[in-house]
């Protein structure tokens, strides 16, 4: 899929904050209508500027489309009928400059990287300026034994986005502590959740996959609490103001909006900057999984 460009004038609205939401909404048919209504309520109440949805199907997307908030967003990709049985979607209120899909060459599940270059007007030095904000989402390779493939997909994703001063990669990255370990990100990339003082990868409030709370994922292979869903950033004109987990309230006993929880982050523009126009932050190295001792036992022989 090649890039699609939208030739529009510069955005006239000044954005004081940018809110993004990443959510694996689960392709399961169990109580899908009720779950999509609940996810839609979360989106309507939080009113994010950009939403990254994983495990989207034509059926659950159609249920979201029926809700009144949906028409305020542009949908990427535009050719939903040409996607796999489940896929990733970006919803955005921000001006789309271009977008592109990159199929992963090493995926057994048909996983892809969906990117969009957005235009944002923000306050700066008592005036305003228009900056590019690259947003991307993917559902990285599932299952513990695909750890090497997953790491290569993460490397490709950040490499693709690193040419932008302001970039955000979010989605169900399927990073499992027992096999992938901690993730070392290349400077200046960082994990939005870990950038908030007091958070750590073992903090229970950071888990987006938690069988101790959400019984909807107890029959699946990943039984440990994990931060499967993450937001990774490379920012020059913004700072992370807040990150929180959403979707933790049940609809009914034992029923949640999804088998995952979502991650929501707020980016605050840096109003005073001395950056020289046209310069790009240099990225040092590539992401690396710091795998724990014994991780090899999860590989297929």
Image (spheres, rainbow, N blue to C red):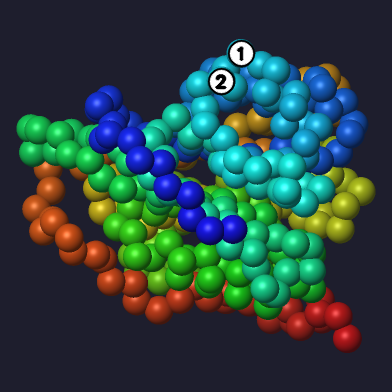
Q: In this orientation, which residue lies closer to the viewer: 32 or 228? A: 32
* Residue 154 x/y as whole percent: 56, 67
Q: Position of residue 219 (x, y in %)?
A: 92, 48
Taking the image as drawn, is residue 202 in sight? Answer: no
Left or right, 132 with respect to 74, comes to left
**Could you give the CA–CA distance between mark 2 and mark 1, rounded to whole angstroms?**
7 Å
Residue annotated with mark 2: 71
**Relative to the observer, which residue lies in front, 59 or 258?**
59
Please report the residue visible at 74 percent of the width from the left and 42 percent of the height from the top.
81
Residue 114 vertical placement versus 247 (above, below): below
Disc 1 crowd rating (10 Å Cα; few below 14, some 14-19, many 20+) is few
Where, by quadrant of the figure, is residue 186 drawn?
Answer: bottom left
Q: Considering the numbered disc 2 on the image, is that residue within a helix, a strand or a loop?
A: helix
Quadrant (top left, top right, bottom left, bottom right) of the C terminus: bottom right
| Extreme residue toward the bottom, this view | 301
Please tell me whether mark 1 sits on a helix, a strand or a loop: helix
* Circle 2 Cα neighbour tier, 10 Å, few/some/many (<14 / 14–19 / ≥20): few
> Height in image: 213 above or below 298?
above
Q: Image check: 97 left or right of 10?
A: right
Which numbered dot is residue 107?
Answer: none
In the image: residue 299, left or right of residue 64: right
Q: Residue at x 36, y 47 (%)?
A: 133
Q: Report the front residue among 101 and 46.
A: 101
Residue underneath mark 1: 68
Is residue 168 visible to the viewer in this orientation of the structure?
yes
- Residue at 86% of width from left, 80% of height from top? 300
Where residue 180 appears, x then y in whole percent?
A: 65, 70
Q: Quadrant of the N terminus?
A: bottom right
Residue 263: image x %, image y %? 56, 40
Give the camera-side residue of 7 and 140: 7
The answer to the question of whether label 2 and label 1 lie on touching residues, with beta carbons closer than 8 A, is yes
Specify the quadrant of the image occupied by residue 138: bottom right
């Amino acid at each position: 899929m090649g890039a699609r460009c939208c030739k529009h004038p510069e955005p006239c609205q000044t954005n004081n904050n940018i809110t993004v939401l990443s959510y694996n909404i689960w392709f399961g048919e169990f109580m899908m209508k009720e779950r999509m209504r609940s996810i839609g309520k979360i989106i309507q109440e939080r009113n994010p500027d950009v939403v990254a949805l994983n495990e989207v199907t034509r059926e659950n997307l159609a249920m979201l489309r029926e809700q009144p908030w949906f028409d305020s967003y542009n949908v990427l990709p535009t050719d939903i009928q040409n996607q796999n049985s489940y896929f990733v979607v970006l919803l955005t209120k921000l001006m789309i400059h271009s977008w592109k899909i990159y199929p992963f060459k090493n995926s057994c599940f048909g996983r892809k990287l969906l990117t969009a270059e957005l235009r944002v007007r923000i306050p700066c030095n008592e005036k305003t300026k228009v900056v590019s904000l690259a947003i991307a989402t993917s559902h990285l390779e599932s299952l513990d034994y695909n750890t090497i493939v997953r790491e290569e997909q993460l490397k490709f994703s950040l490499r693709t986005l690193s040419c932008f001063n302001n970039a955000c990669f979010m989605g169900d990255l399927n990073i499992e502590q027992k096999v992938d370990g901690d993730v070392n990100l290349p400077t200046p990339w960082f994990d939005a959740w870990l950038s908030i003082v007091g958070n750590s990868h073992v903090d229970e409030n950071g888990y987006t996959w938690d069988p101790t709370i959400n019984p909807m994922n107890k029959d699946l292979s990943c039984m440990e609490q994990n931060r499967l869903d993450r937001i990774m950033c490379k920012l020059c004109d913004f700072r992370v103001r807040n990150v929180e987990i959403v979707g933790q309230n049940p609809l009914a006993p034992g029923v949640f909006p999804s088998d995952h929880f979502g991650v929501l982050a707020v980016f605050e523009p840096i109003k005073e900057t001395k950056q020289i126009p046209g310069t790009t932050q240099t990225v040092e190295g590539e992401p690396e999984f710091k795998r724990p001792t014994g991780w090899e036992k999860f590989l297929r022989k």
